[in-house]
Structure formats: C-alpha cells, structure tokens
Amino acid sequence: MGIIWMIIIGYMAAMIGIGLYAKTKIKDSTDYHLAGRRLGPIMLAGTLAATEIGGGSSVGVASKAYGDWGLSAGWYVVSAGIGILLVSFIAPYMRKAMATTVPEIIGRRYGKSSYTIASLLSFVASIALAAVQITATASIIHVLTGFSLVWAILLTGLGVVFYTYIGGMWSVTLTDFVQFFIIVFGFAIAVPFAFHNAGGFETVMSNLPPEQLGFTKIGWGTIIGLTIMYFMTFSTGQEAVQRYYSAKNQKVAVTGSLLCGILMTLYAFIPAVLGLIALATFPTINANDALAIVSVELLPPVISGILLSGVISATLSSASGNLLAVASVYVKDIHGSILKKEVLPQNELKLSKVVVALSGFGAIGISLFSQQIIPLLVFAFTLRSTGPFAAYILGLIWDRVTPKAGLYSIVLGTVVGLGWQLAKEPFGIMAVIAGCIASLITFLLVNKIELNRGVPASPSAYESADKYTG
C-alpha cells in the first residue's frame, strides 16, 4: 500500500505542478474559461475524453459490470463515444458562434426568458455533476485509506476546488491531456495482471454466472437509448460545449471530436472486464468498491498506483470541468445579464474564482447528502439537456427560428423530462430522451405556427451577444 500511495501522491503533485504552470498562462477571463481559444486537435480530444471518462465511465462501469449489467456495461462508454462522434457534425457551428456558454446562444436567438431558464438549468446541473465526480473519487479514497466516506468526500472536494481555482481551463486542459493517456494505459496493462492474480482467465470465467458474459445483456433498447442520451447531453452540456468553444478553429473542433469518440470507444470495455474479475474473486463486496479492490488486491503496487492515480485524476478533472462550467455560466450569463450586476472585465477573473470556490462547496454538500453516482449523473443530464436541447441545436443550425419556439420547448421539455424521471421512466424510455423528444416536437410545431403567422425570425446565433442582453 505504501508504494501505491507514493505513486498517487507523486502523480497528484505533478498534476498540481501542471496547474500552477497553467496559472502563468492566464491573462484574462477568456484564458481562464476558454484557454484563449487556442486548443489543437490532440489537446481537444484529450480534454474531451478525460472530461467524459470520469467516475461514471470508470468506477460506475466497473460497478455496473459487477452488478446487473455484466460485460455489457462497456456499452455505457461505447454509447458515449458514439454520442461524441455524432456531436462532431454540429461542432463547427459551436466554434463558429464564438460564445462561452450554452445559454448565451439560447439568449441570442430566443430572448431573455429562455436565456434565464437555460442559465439556471445549466448552473444547477453542473454543480450536481461535480458532486457525482467527487463521490466517485471519494469511493476510491475510502477503500485505499479506510477513511469514512464522509471524510473522503470532504478531502476530495477541497482538492478539486483548489485544482480548479488556480488554473481554470488551461489547468484542466493540460492535466486532462496527461490524465487521459495515463488512465487508458493504466487500465490496459491492469487487465492481464488482474486475470493472472485472480487465478487465470479460465478460473475467472468459471466463477462468473454465464449471463454476466452477455455482450448485449442490457439490451439494444438501452444501448440505443444511451447513445441518444449522450448525444443530447454532450451537445448541450456546458462542460463539453465549452471545450468546443476553446478549439483553435472549426476544423479543429471536428477533428478533435472525432478522435475523442474513437479513443473512448476503444477504452470502453476495459473497466467492465475489471468489474467482472472483481465479481469472480470478491463476490460479496460493495459494487462501488469493485475497481478499487481489484486494484489493491490483484495488481502489482506500481500498476495499481498508476491505475488509481489515473482514475482519481480523471474523476477530479471531470469535477473540475463541471465547476468551471458553473463559473462560466454565472459570470457570463447570470451575474451581469440576469441579475444586472455590473462586472468590469478586469474583475471577471476574480469573480470566476470566487464562484468556483462557492459552487465547489455546494457540490461537496450534495455529495455528502446523496453519495450516489449513476442515478445523480442521469438526473443532472436530464435537468440540463431535456429543455434546451432543441432550442440550442436548432438555434445553431437553422436561420428561421422564433423566440416562442425556443421558450415553449425549453419549458415543456424540462417539465416532461423531470416528470418522466419522477414517474420511474415509464415504458423503459429514459427521462432525458422523453424530455428531449417533447422539446423537439414542441419546437417544430410552435416554430411552424409562428412562421406561418408572419412572426419574424430571431437574430442569428452568430451576431453580437450584445443584442440579447436587453
């Protein structure tokens, strides 16, 4: 355990060092929020992948493989990879808009009411997503140290607040780039060692219920549903969209997105396999502890240290991206445009850091109260995506849209999505899909009616942001 801890501490120190270096590159709020819009394709792919391969795609997938989903838990990440590939088709429109947040585009096209609702939804959902990543990281710290989960959450949360506070998007991007390749390398080399120390491939297979090896056990309906869900949430999620805004140009936005989708798909089933090895070897443990216990009990200390360092850093990075998203939405959308409080350009950076700290404490509180990973993740996806989905996507790619089409679709989509989730997702249809479909249908109907009545179309998404703040 001493070697594992030495590697983890050394790795985290290196990440903090990168963060401190990134701090020197920050001259203004554009650098803090968007890395100066200078990301190349490799950096963009790395930061996108590291952001989306967080607690749900590592700890969560291993947990699901240990539990009901078996090997097919890998589809959770494959679906995410396909979702990112689909987002590639609208990535150039995102970058062309020269925006900072998702609500900013909605405000340009549909007016103040839509802008306010979208801002609040994005703000709350991003805090909840940060809480998910804090919980995922804390579950590993809990196993490694024996600390109570409460203390692990507090330590993890304070760490991620500091991590985000010092370096913003430059810090997140540079560390993401390292973290993604470390986590893929760590997982890849962990599998053969875990099989060997669990008694070999045949021993592991013989100790698993046959149904756990079903490649599509979760069903094609769930697989397709996950893919649709990820496309919807990645195309409207502030932490993902903000990275497309940070690309050097439109071509980089597409190339980086395509590369990210491919990398995520290649990685997908590795944590699921480790979850199955945990089930075969430790059949009575808590499912959320499967990945950490396999790492500590079945891997050589050096490999375990690399793997757990990558997982901890990736989940912290995802949380960092979410906190940065909260700060961006508050500073760019809520503080000045909605609350009508003036913030001078030279004070934006200071305000952003204050919001990172305060929202981080809020995420810690949610994590302490919930202590869930996948359920809270899905709730946050539903909250942020169902309403704004149609308004944001169609607002980017269509010229002729009307303000009421955006407003009505945001309201109805959000109500249907959250109501569907409270109703325990009838007919097996995911709440985020039901809400987004309601949002899309409402938008198309209202927009057609408005245009037929001669209502003028909204201003372009690519015009100055000054036109929507009044």
Image: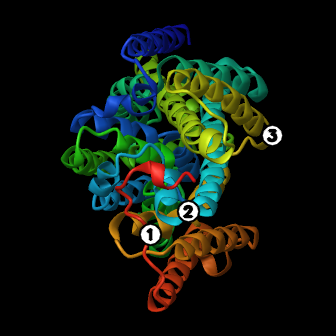
Residue 334 vs 218, above or below: the answer is above
Q: How many residues crowd around disc 3 within 10 Å: few (fewer than 14), some, or many (20 or more)?
A: few
Q: Nearer the viewer, residue 427 or 210?
A: 427
Q: Are marks 1 and 3 in contact (CB under 8 Å)?
A: no
Q: Quadrant of the N terminus?
A: top right
In the rendered image, the residue lying farthest to the right is: 369
Alpha-carbon distance for marks 2 and 3?
Answer: 36 Å
Q: Nearer the viewer, residue 344 or 251?
A: 344
Would residue 301 appear left or right of 400 to someone viewing this image?
right
Q: How many residues crowd around disc 2 within 10 Å: few (fewer than 14), some, or many (20 or more)?
A: many
Residue at image point 56% right, 42% down: 329
Query: Which numbered tag is attached to residue 458?
Result: 1
Q: Is residue 129 visible?
A: no
Q: Label 3's element? A: helix
Residue 310, percent from left and from top: 44, 27
Q: Amino acid at mark 3?
A: Phe
Q: Which mark sits nearer the N-terminus, 2 or 1?
A: 2
Residue 367 vs 1, above or below: the answer is below
Residue 270 lies in what quarter of the image?
Answer: top left
Q: Which mark sits nearer the N-terminus, 1 or 3?
A: 3
Query: Which numbered tag is attached to residue 369?
Result: 3
